[in-house]
């Protein structure tokens, strides 16, 4: 997780190639979402912890498949070779900076912790997408994320509303 959070490109390549890392990737998503839930304990109690974790795992799965479709069908490069599992694994690991959301338990820094970790996760997602889709540069990965991230965010928002709101 540390290597993923430090944006270590070689880690994303390793995860992309290791089919056994899907479970580890899911655990990164769970840990990140639990950290967000713990960060909100003081303000919202324990209820959001469970619901946020469920919503985060569901939206991770959807986001990986959306990114896969966009990257391989809409914006492939000549070097693009990927399967949906590669996106699941790399995007899951890109959630690693989300563990910093646990710092939101300290109320004065809560907004900063959420904003900073979200931006960091977005940067990690671009790297994850670039590596999983074997793009030679970052521009296409940025485009995949720019197109797909609103779908991911909307999915997460809808899930949160259906499962129980968790306002900041």
Image (cartoon, grey):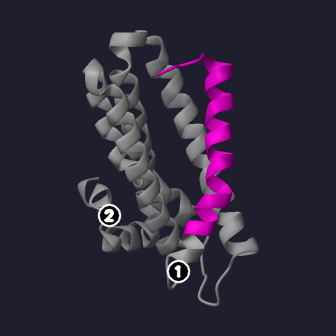
Residue at x 47% of width, y 59% of height: 125
Q: Position of residue 67 (x, y in %)?
A: 63, 61
Q: Is residue 151 magenta?
A: yes
Residue 134: mark in rendering: 1
Left or right: where 63 falls relative to 118: right
Of the image marks 1 and 2, the number of the one nearer the N terminus: 2
Q: Please tell me whether residue 79 is drawn above or below residue 156 in the rendered image.
A: below
Contact (CB < 8 A) between labels 1 and 2?
no
Residue 19: mark in rendering: none
Of badges 1 and 2, nearer the viewer stands: 2
Residue at x 44% of width, y 67% of height: 127
> Callout 1: helix, strand or loop?
loop
Magenta residue span = 142-168
Disc 2 crowd, CA 10 A, few/some/many (<14, 14-19, 20+):
many
**Real-space CA distance between mark 1 and mark 2, rounded to the nearest whole angstrom:** 16 Å
User: Can you see residue 22?
Assistant: no
Q: Quadrant of residue 3?
A: bottom left
Disc 1 crowd, CA 10 A, few/some/many (<14, 14-19, 20+):
many
Extreme residue in the right direction: 74
> Callout 2: helix, strand or loop?
loop
Residue at x 41% of width, y 59% of height: 124
Q: Quadrant of residue 111?
A: top left
Q: Please tell me whether residue 18 is drawn above or below residue 155 in the rendered image.
A: below
Q: Is residue 131 magenta?
A: no
Total label count? Answer: 2
> Dot 2 corresponds to which residue?
7
């Amino acid at each position: 997780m540390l290597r993923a959070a430090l944006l270590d490109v070689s880690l994303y390549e390793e995860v992309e190639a290791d089919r056994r890392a899907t479970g580890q990737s899911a655990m990164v998503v769970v840990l990140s979402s639990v950290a967000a839930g713990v960060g909100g304990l003081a303000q919202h109690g324990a209820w959001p912890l469970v619901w946020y974790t469920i919503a985060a795992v569901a939206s991770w799965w959807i986001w990986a498949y959306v990114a896969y479709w966009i990257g391989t069908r809409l914006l492939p490069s000549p070097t693009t070779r990927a399967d949906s599992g590669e996106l699941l694994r790399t995007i899951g690991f890109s959630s690693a900076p989300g563990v910093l959301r646990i710092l939101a338990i300290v109320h004065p820094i809560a907004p900063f912790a959420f904003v900073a970790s979200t931006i960091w996760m977005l940067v990690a997602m671009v790297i994850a997408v670039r590596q999983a889709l074997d793009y030679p540069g970052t521009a296409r990965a940025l485009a995949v994320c720019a197109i797909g991230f609103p779908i991911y965010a909307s999915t997460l928002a809808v899930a949160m509303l259906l499962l129980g709101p968790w306002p900041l």
